[in-house]
Amino acid sequence: MAGSDVIPRDGSGPDGEPDGRWSGPWPDGWSVDHVAETTSTNDDLLHAARRDEVPDRGVLAADHQTAGRGRLDRRWDAPAGRNLLVSILFREVPEVASVLTQTVGLALVHGLESLAGRPLGPRLGLKWPNDVVIGDRKLAGVLAQRCTTTGAVVVGTGVNVGWAPPGAASVLDDLDLDVAPAEVLHHLLVAHDALVADAVGRGAAVIARMTTIGRRVRVLLPAERELVGTARGVDDVGRLVVETDDGRSHVLDVGDVVHLRPLERRPG
Ligand code: BTN
């Protein structure tokens, strides 16, 4: 795909065809499909994972989802055509599956920097476990789901490109980039290829962009529990290590993190 001026943001291709801008060319090895509407691109690829129709690194994007899934059983909604709603099927799954989600998140960060033509850190970064943030506002979320029959993993991401819900960030308003969702996907895939080619540097790059590390955090845990402490790091299987004020370390594999100001304490 050429420069960022070739794809209109309103959903039409250069010739006015609704699907024109999704026609590629895409980087080698990715099979990109696009639909105007579906329930959830993650659901679609999970179904496809059981058949042989979609290969490893098959990609499905939609202008609109009627039942988009977020983490922790939440919904993920966006007006048609404004944001990037896309899932990738990975049939080759690394031993540590969180590598897949972290790589997609970091590829988005790098892809946006490539679109902007400049580094965007430290403002643009990753928030544990799988968010891409600008400052403390969410720009994108990543949801991984495993196909129980084949072991394949679907990694879906919703990126606020031209629209953001209240309190969240968008590529348009916060990075001042007037780009189409397909273009963001293109740059994400190119950046993903570069990260996979540098497996050693990838882990360090994830940690370097993980804005949660070193922050005082409140982690909302299942069963309405929570933990307040300082995020000390992410272990080699992607779990967050939080040190509470009594000096104990807690290793968390699920939770919602709130970044706190340094001295902020739990209310009450
Ligand atoms: C999160 O809650 O932060 C993760 C959101 C993931 C949303 C994306 S949109 C494309 C893909 N299809 C879905 O149903 N969900 C993911």
Image (spheres, rainbow, N blue to C red):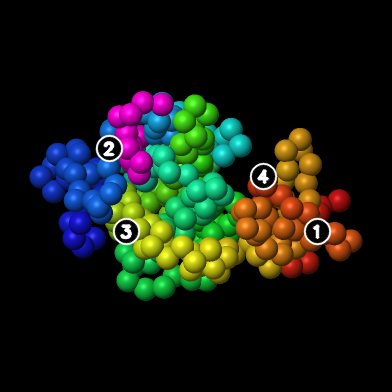
- Lower position in the chain sequence, tag 2 or tag 3: 2
User: Which residue is label 2 attached to?
Assistant: 34
- Tell me if I can see residue 176 in this picture: no
Pick the front one: 223 or 258: 223
Amino acid type of the residue tagged 1 in the rendering: Ser
Q: CA distance from mark 4 to mark 1?
A: 15 Å
**Could you classify mark 3 by the number of other residues whose Cα lies within 10 Å: few (under 14), some (14-19), or many (20 or more)?**
some
Query: Furthest residue to the left?
Result: 15
**Could you classify mark 2 by the number of other residues whose Cα lies within 10 Å: few (under 14), some (14-19), or many (20 or more)?**
some
- Lower position in the chain sequence, tag 4 or tag 1: 1
- Lower position in the chain sequence, tag 2 or tag 4: 2
Residue 51 placement, left or right of 95: left
- Lower position in the chain sequence, tag 3 or tag 4: 3
**SS for tag 1?**
strand
Q: Residue 62: where, in percent of width, then height?
A: 33, 37
Amino acid type of the residue tagged 3 in the rendering: Val
Residue 223: quarter of image: top right
Label of residue 190 in the image: 3
User: Which residue is label 4 attached to?
Assistant: 254
Residue 55: say if magenta. Answer: yes
Amino acid type of the residue tagged 4 in the rendering: Val
Residue 255: say if magenta. Answer: no
Query: Furthest residue to the bottom?
Result: 118
